[in-house]
Image (cartoon, coloured by chain):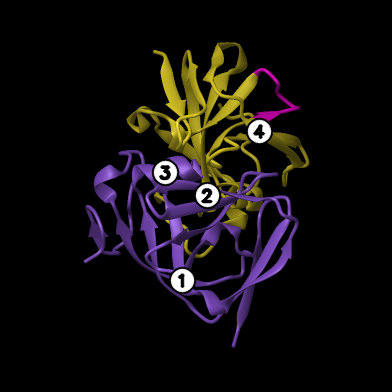
Amino acid sequence: MTAVSGQCLCGAFRFTVEGPLENVRLCHCDFCRRGNGSAYSANCRVPVERFSVVRDDSALRHFESSPGARRHFCGTCGSPVFAKVDGDPDHIRIRLGTLDREAAAEIVAHVWVGSKASRDLISDDLPQFDERAA
Amino acid sequence: MTATGGCLCGTVTFECDELGAAGYCHCEDCRRCTGSAFNVSVRCAASGFRILSGEPASFTKSGDSGCELTRYFCQSCGSPLFTSSLRDPAVIYVKAGVLDDPETVRPALQAWTRSKVVWANIPSDIESFEEGRGSTA
């Protein structure tokens, strides 16, 4: 099965993900905007067994942005790398920006567009949801 | 007009006297720094930028341009906040996503488009540069 690799900005945390990157939602909510500093968060939910840590210099930290949802980031360079949700322990939500550039992902929708900034023009034909995807 | 902003957990807050030009950057470092398709940054004079609360952590690395950049983030929640450059210490580049009023930002260009990922979503009608922005804005 094809694996793609990724890492934080400084390289203290490196990982691989096996299999296709499907059902990616671009989230425009206020948490994702502030948590990433950009227009949206590009999140891919994958089963934990497909996620492997290659290097971990014990730099990872996390912030519980909402009850049971923890956003993990590198404490050395600040890169947001993944999130975990207590109610969904079998999956991990990786941040696509940390993947090597060659990784291809299937983007399926923009979510929480009701929260997006007006500067953030959505010019594609993907489905949009004011809140969660249906 | 003074603009305010802050991290996800509220520990670090800041204000800047006046926001300048804004743009998208698709370079690899900006992608990893934000975990997203691209970075959206807004120029602000360093003399008019003030941290109101908290103490951000920082990480310094040379970007694709060869210029050394220091990226500041919240050490409690990880929010990327702003960047400073050795090449132009009079300027602060604020991360547009952490501004309290995102409507004040109007990106006018995009840079490092040669590094953009296939899944980036960008408007098609703004100015583009394959590498740095040069002297624009």
Q: Which residue is mark 2?
A: B38
Q: Chain of mark 2?
A: B
Q: Would residue A7 be seen by someone viewing this image from the given angle? A: yes
- SS assignment for the magenta stretch, majority: loop
- Say if mark 1 contacts mark 4, CB within 8 Å: no
A131 displayed left or right of A5: left
The amino acid pointed to by label 2 is Phe
Residue A105 in the image: above or below residue A120: below
- Image hue for chain A: purple
- What amino acid type is highlighted by mark number 3? Arg
Residue A70 drawn at (x, y percent):
47, 53
Q: Which element type, helix, strand or loop, lies under badge 1? A: strand
Spatial CA span between label 1 and label 4 = 29 Å
Residue B129 percent location from the top left of the image: 58, 45
Residue A96 in the magenta stretch? The answer is: no
Residue closest to the eye, B73 or B42: B73
Q: Residue at x 39, y 49 (%)?
A: B123
Mark whose residue sits in front, 2 or 1: 1
Which subunit holds the residue at mark 1? A
The answer for how far apart the CA atoms under marks 1 and 3 are is 22 Å
Residue B86 in the magenta stretch? The answer is yes
User: Circle 1 is placed at which residue position?
Assistant: A91
Label 4: few (<14), some or many (≥20) within 10 Å? Answer: some
